[in-house]
Protein backbone atom coordinates (compact mmCIF):
# COMPACT_ATOMS: atom_id res chain seq x y z
CA UNK A 1 0.00 0.00 0.00
CA UNK A 2 2.78 2.47 0.85
CA UNK A 3 4.39 1.82 -2.57
CA UNK A 4 1.12 2.63 -4.29
CA UNK A 5 0.87 5.88 -2.31
CA UNK A 6 4.50 6.80 -3.07
CA UNK A 7 4.01 6.03 -6.77
CA UNK A 8 0.87 8.14 -6.86
CA UNK A 9 2.61 11.10 -5.20
CA UNK A 10 5.55 10.90 -7.61
CA UNK A 11 3.23 10.63 -10.60
CA UNK A 12 1.17 13.65 -9.57
CA UNK A 13 4.21 15.78 -8.67
CA UNK A 14 5.98 14.97 -11.92
CA UNK A 15 2.86 15.77 -13.97
CA UNK A 16 2.35 19.02 -12.04
CA UNK A 17 5.86 20.17 -12.97
CA UNK A 18 5.62 19.07 -16.59
CA UNK A 19 5.08 22.40 -18.33
CA UNK A 20 4.34 22.31 -22.03
CA UNK A 21 5.09 25.52 -23.86
CA UNK A 22 3.09 26.24 -26.97
CA UNK A 23 4.49 28.13 -29.97
CA UNK A 24 3.17 31.48 -28.75
CA UNK A 25 4.72 30.93 -25.29
CA UNK A 26 8.07 30.02 -26.84
CA UNK A 27 8.13 33.12 -29.03
CA UNK A 28 7.09 35.38 -26.13
CA UNK A 29 9.87 33.97 -23.92
CA UNK A 30 12.45 34.25 -26.71
CA UNK A 31 11.44 37.85 -27.39
CA UNK A 32 11.57 38.86 -23.72
CA UNK A 33 14.94 37.17 -23.10
CA UNK A 34 16.31 38.72 -26.31
CA UNK A 35 15.14 42.10 -25.04
CA UNK A 36 17.08 41.47 -21.80
CA UNK A 37 20.27 40.67 -23.78
CA UNK A 38 19.77 43.80 -25.91
CA UNK A 39 19.31 45.97 -22.81
CA UNK A 40 22.40 44.38 -21.26
CA UNK A 41 24.64 45.30 -24.19
CA UNK A 42 23.24 48.84 -24.25
CA UNK A 43 23.69 49.29 -20.48
CA UNK A 44 27.27 48.00 -20.61
CA UNK A 45 28.10 50.59 -23.27
CA UNK A 46 26.34 53.38 -21.40
CA UNK A 47 27.25 52.59 -17.78
CA UNK A 48 30.29 50.32 -17.93
CA UNK A 49 30.86 47.10 -15.98
CA UNK A 50 28.62 48.09 -13.05
CA UNK A 51 25.67 47.33 -15.34
CA UNK A 52 26.38 43.58 -15.03
CA UNK A 53 24.96 43.63 -11.51
CA UNK A 54 21.53 44.60 -12.86
CA UNK A 55 21.48 41.41 -14.94
CA UNK A 56 22.87 38.87 -12.48
CA UNK A 57 20.28 37.22 -10.28
CA UNK A 58 20.79 38.39 -6.70
CA UNK A 59 20.23 34.98 -5.14
CA UNK A 60 22.27 32.16 -3.59
CA UNK A 61 21.83 30.19 -6.83
CA UNK A 62 23.86 32.66 -8.95
CA UNK A 63 27.37 31.68 -10.03
CA UNK A 64 29.73 32.38 -12.92
CA UNK A 65 32.43 30.22 -14.45
CA UNK A 66 35.09 31.08 -16.99
CA UNK A 67 37.68 28.96 -18.72
CA UNK A 68 36.73 25.90 -16.70
CA UNK A 69 36.98 27.58 -13.28
CA UNK A 70 34.43 28.98 -10.89
CA UNK A 71 34.88 32.75 -11.11
CA UNK A 72 32.11 33.87 -8.76
CA UNK A 73 30.47 31.49 -6.32
CA UNK A 74 27.54 33.85 -5.73
CA UNK A 75 26.13 37.29 -6.46
CA UNK A 76 27.99 38.90 -3.53
CA UNK A 77 31.36 37.71 -4.88
CA UNK A 78 30.48 39.07 -8.33
CA UNK A 79 29.40 42.39 -6.81
CA UNK A 80 32.57 42.71 -4.77
CA UNK A 81 34.83 42.07 -7.78
CA UNK A 82 32.87 44.37 -10.08
CA UNK A 83 32.74 47.21 -7.52
CA UNK A 84 36.28 46.81 -6.15
CA UNK A 85 38.18 45.97 -9.33
CA UNK A 86 36.37 45.98 -12.65
CA UNK A 87 34.82 49.47 -12.46
CA UNK A 88 38.23 50.89 -11.53
CA UNK A 89 39.92 49.22 -14.50
CA UNK A 90 37.33 49.61 -17.29
CA UNK A 91 35.02 52.51 -18.08
CA UNK A 92 33.12 50.93 -20.95
CA UNK A 93 32.32 47.52 -22.36
CA UNK A 94 31.06 47.05 -25.89
CA UNK A 95 29.53 43.59 -26.26
CA UNK A 96 28.19 42.11 -29.48
CA UNK A 97 26.35 38.79 -29.62
CA UNK A 98 26.94 36.48 -32.59
CA UNK A 99 24.20 33.96 -33.42
CA UNK A 100 22.33 34.36 -30.14
CA UNK A 101 20.37 31.23 -29.18
CA UNK A 102 17.53 31.32 -26.70
CA UNK A 103 15.90 28.03 -25.76
CA UNK A 104 12.91 28.34 -23.42
CA UNK A 105 12.97 25.59 -20.78
CA UNK A 106 9.82 26.66 -18.92
CA UNK A 107 7.80 29.83 -18.42
CA UNK A 108 10.50 31.09 -16.01
CA UNK A 109 13.74 29.55 -17.33
CA UNK A 110 15.60 29.83 -20.61
CA UNK A 111 18.97 28.75 -21.89
CA UNK A 112 21.00 31.53 -23.52
CA UNK A 113 24.06 30.87 -25.66
CA UNK A 114 26.02 32.94 -28.13
CA UNK A 115 29.34 33.72 -29.62
CA UNK A 116 30.51 37.18 -28.61
CA UNK A 117 32.92 39.96 -29.44
CA UNK A 118 33.86 42.33 -26.66
CA UNK A 119 35.83 45.54 -26.35
CA UNK A 120 36.83 46.67 -22.87
CA UNK A 121 38.01 50.28 -22.70
CA UNK A 122 40.13 51.45 -19.77
CA UNK A 123 40.24 54.96 -18.33
CA UNK A 124 43.21 55.89 -20.53
CA UNK A 125 41.26 54.96 -23.66
CA UNK A 126 43.18 51.75 -24.33
CA UNK A 127 41.05 48.88 -25.60
CA UNK A 128 41.29 45.16 -24.93
CA UNK A 129 39.46 42.84 -27.30
CA UNK A 130 38.08 39.37 -26.63
CA UNK A 131 36.09 36.84 -28.60
CA UNK A 132 34.54 33.64 -27.37
CA UNK A 133 31.38 31.87 -26.36
CA UNK A 134 28.88 32.63 -23.63
CA UNK A 135 26.23 30.38 -22.12
CA UNK A 136 23.81 30.99 -19.28
CA UNK A 137 20.50 30.14 -17.72
CA UNK A 138 18.15 33.11 -17.49
CA UNK A 139 15.40 33.13 -14.89
CA UNK A 140 12.33 35.34 -14.89
CA UNK A 141 12.12 37.30 -11.65
CA UNK A 142 9.80 40.01 -10.36
CA UNK A 143 12.26 42.47 -11.96
CA UNK A 144 12.36 40.76 -15.35
CA UNK A 145 14.82 38.24 -16.74
CA UNK A 146 18.12 37.82 -14.88
CA UNK A 147 21.13 35.57 -15.42
CA UNK A 148 20.97 32.76 -12.87
CA UNK A 149 24.39 31.51 -13.92
CA UNK A 150 26.85 32.18 -16.72
CA UNK A 151 29.93 30.73 -18.37
CA UNK A 152 32.44 32.50 -20.60
CA UNK A 153 35.00 30.82 -22.83
CA UNK A 154 37.57 33.09 -24.46
CA UNK A 155 39.19 32.17 -27.76
CA UNK A 156 42.96 32.33 -27.56
CA UNK A 157 44.35 35.00 -29.89
Image (cartoon, grey):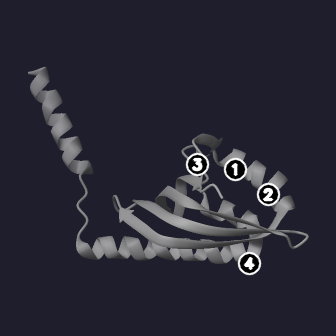
Residue that label 4 marks: 46
Q: In 3D space, how far apart are the residues under numbered discs 4 and 2 (Cα atoms)?
A: 15 Å
Q: Quadrant of the C terminus?
A: bottom right
The CA distance from mark 3 to mark 1 is 11 Å
Between the C-alphas of marks 2 and 3, the distance is 21 Å
The nearer-to-camera label among 3 and 4 is 4
Q: Is residue 6 above or below residue 92?
A: above
Q: Secondary structure at mark 4?
A: helix
Q: Residue at coordinates 23% horizontally, 52% vertically from top-left?
A: 18
Query: Viewer-nearest of labels 3 and 1?
Result: 1
Quarter of the figure with residue 14? top left
Q: Residues within 10 Å of mark 4 (few under 14, many from 20)?
A: some
Q: Position of residue 47 (x, y in %)?
A: 75, 73
Report helix, strand or loop for mark 3.
loop
Which of discs 2 and 1 lies nearer the camera? The answer is 2
| Residue of label 1 | 78
What mark, if any, has residue 86 been given in the picture? 2
Disc with the residue nearer the chain's start (4 vs 1): 4
For disc 3, the neighbor class at 10 Å (few under 14, some 14 to 19, many from 20) is few
The furthest residue to the front: 157
Q: Gap between marks 4 and 1, in whole Å? A: 20 Å
Up-down relation of residue 73 to residue 156 (above or below): above
Query: Where, quadrant-wise, is the N terminus in this rendering?
Result: top left
The secondary element bearing badge 1 is classed as: helix
Q: Position of residue 147 (x, y in %)?
A: 54, 58
Which residue corresponds to the image point at 33% horizontal and 75% vertical from the top-left? Answer: 27
**Label located before the other in sequence (4 or 2):** 4
- Residue 103, quarter of picture: bottom left
| Separation (CA) of disc 3 from disc 4 | 25 Å
Q: Which residue is mark 3?
A: 59
Amino acid sequence: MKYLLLSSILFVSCRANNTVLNTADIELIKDSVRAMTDHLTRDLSDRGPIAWLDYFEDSPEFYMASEGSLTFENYQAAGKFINDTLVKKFVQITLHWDQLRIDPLSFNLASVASGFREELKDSSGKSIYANGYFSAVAEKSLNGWKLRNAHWSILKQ
